[in-house]
Image (cartoon, coloured by chain):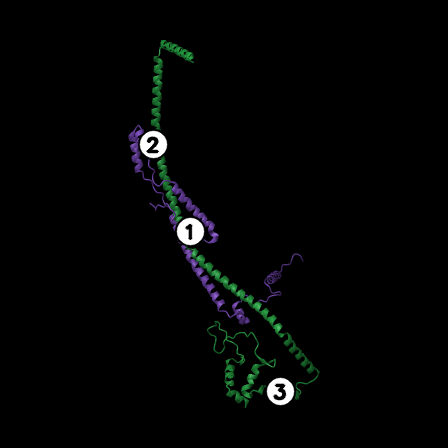
């Protein structure tokens, strides 16, 4: 009866469709599909890659998964799962499959304690653990990011080095140029040498002419002086001497 | 006669930009040499320097001698030095070009590999959704490998030490202290 209501409200077809998606998949709580590059052979329609769920699926009464209820709805209607649960407990107890003795009470206490601790501290513990997970994830992400960065740097370095190879042409060009410059310098040095040698020869000839002329002059002067001296007689010398003394005297009287 | 060069036609500023940082000293040496050669060339006269023959003609006793000197000086042909090294440099350049082409090919291959690695990292399953298998696929060197178990405390340094100890034990050498 209730199942028909469910069908009439088109609850069932949706759940059925979801159930078909993947045999292991919960129904209402559908895991998201992860869009990543996959191997081309992978069957993405029937077996898509699913995201890792961050949080657990919804539950009822603290621990019974929602899927259980969804599983019962099409067959038994809305009350079905509860009736099944109550019937199961009744059966187990009445057939003494589960015997109620002192251990049973301990079990009740134990699970109550667990539930209490979960209620009181569950969120805090979860927060601490989440923080740890986030920290680790962040570290791993940084690792990947650094990898990417170093790859990028390596690519840039390669490109730069490729660009720098253009300098090789310049090196060769400048080497050739250096040789040409040295040849030019040598040529000019030869020019200068020729000039210097010719100039030296010319200067030598000039100097020869000069010296000849100077010697001739010297010789002429010597010759004239010696001839003049030779032509002077002792009489003339005496007269000159006397004249000198007279001159000296006149000079002395004037002074 | 080879080409007459009196100036450096190389674009040194552009050249300097292309020099890798660790090779600047080589570049400086080359540049220094080139500058030096240019300086030497500029210090020397370009052609045959002129001689004032009229002065010599008037002063020399024998003008015919000066005349002869002048004629021979004007007729003198100074040989340009032979260029023996340019072919060597040319060959060097060809060789360098060949090796550069090879290197660039290798470099392009390296870049391609790096790009592939980059693409792989970019298209990787996000870390928070990775399973152990995915991790092993992406980072085989970091993932747990059952064939190569690690020892406590599982860091690299201790692995190295333990590995050395194992090798020592395998080689059968006794420690000298014992």
Disc 3 is placed on an element classified as helix
Badge 1 marks a residue whose secondary structure is helix
Residue displayed at 35% across by 17% down: A225
Q: Is residue A152 visible?
A: yes
**Residue B164 placement: quadrant:** bottom right
| Quarter of the figure with the C terminus of chain A | top left
Q: Which chain does the residue under circle 3 lie in?
A: A
- Tell which tag, 2 or 1, sits nearer the viewer: 1
Quarter of the figure with residue B46: top left
In the image, B76 versus A34, the foreground residue is A34
Q: Nearer the viewer, mark 3 or mark 2?
A: 3
Q: Tell me if residue B79 comes above or below residue B15 in the rendering.
A: above
Pointer 3 residue: A86
Q: Are marks 3 and 1 on the same chain?
A: no
Which chain did the image draw in purple?
B
> Which residue matches tag 1?
B13
Task: Tell me the residue that label 2 is attached to.
Answer: A202
Indicate left or right for B163 with B9 as reference.
right
Which element type, helix, strand or loop, lies under badge 2? helix
Question: Which of these two is toward me, B24 or A109?
Answer: A109
Q: Nearer the viewer, residue A67 or B150?
A: A67
Q: Position of residue B140 (x, y in %)?
A: 53, 67
**Chain A shade:** green
């Amino acid at each position: 009866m209730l199942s028909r209501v469910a069908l009439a409200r088109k609850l069932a077809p949706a759940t059925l469709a979801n159930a078909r998606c993947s045999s292991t998949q919960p129904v209402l709580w559908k895991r998201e599909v992860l869009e990543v590059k996959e191997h081309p052979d992978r069957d993405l329609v029937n077996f898509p890659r699913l995201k890792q769920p961050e949080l657990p699926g919804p539950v009822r009464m603290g621990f019974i998964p929602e899927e259980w209820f969804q599983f019962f709805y099409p067959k038994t209607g809305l009350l079905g799962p509860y009736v099944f649960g109550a019937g199961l407990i009744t059966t187990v107890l009445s057939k003494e499959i589960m015997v109620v003795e002192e251990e049973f009470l301990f079990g009740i206490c134990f699970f109550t304690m667990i539930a209490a601790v979960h209620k009181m501290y569950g969120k805090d513990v979860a927060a601490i653990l989440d923080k740890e997970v986030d920290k680790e994830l962040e570290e791993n992400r940084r690792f990947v990011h650094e990898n990417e960065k170093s790859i990028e740097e390596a690519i840039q370095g390669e490109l730069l080095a490729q660009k720098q190879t253009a300098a090789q042409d310049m090196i060769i060009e400048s080497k050739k140029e250096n040789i040409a410059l040295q040849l030019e310098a040598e040529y000019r040095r030869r020019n200068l040498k020729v000039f210097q040698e010719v100039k030296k020869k010319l200067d030598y000839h000039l100097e020869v002419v000069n010296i000849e002329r100077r010697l001739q002059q010297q010789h002429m002067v010597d010759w004239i002086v010696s001839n003049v001296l030779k032509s002077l007689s002792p009489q003339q010398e005496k007269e000159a001497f006397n004249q000198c003394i007279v001159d000296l005297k006149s000079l002395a009287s004037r002074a | 006669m080879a080409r007459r060069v009196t100036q450096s036609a190389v674009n040194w500023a552009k050249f300097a930009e292309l020099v890798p940082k660790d090779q600047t000293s080589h570049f400086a040496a080359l540049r220094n040499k080139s500058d030096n050669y240019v300086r030497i060339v500029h210090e020397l006269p370009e052609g045959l320097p002129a001689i004032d023959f009229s002065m010599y003609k008037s002063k020399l006793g024998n003008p015919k001698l000066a005349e002869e000197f002048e004629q021979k000086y004007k007729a003198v042909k100074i040989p340009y030095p032979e260029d023996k090294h340019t072919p060597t440099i040319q060959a060097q350049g060809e060789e360098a070009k060949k090796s550069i082409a090879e290197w660039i090919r290798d470099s392009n291959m390296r870049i391609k590999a790096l790009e592939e690695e980059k693409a792989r990292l970019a298209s990787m399953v996000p870390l928070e959704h990775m399973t152990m298998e995915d991790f092993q696929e992406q980072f085989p060197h970091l993932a747990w490998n059952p064939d190569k178990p690690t020892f406590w405390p599982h860091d690299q340094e201790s692995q190295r030490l333990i590995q050395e100890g194992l090798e020592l034990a395998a080689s059968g050498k006794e420690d000298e202290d014992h």
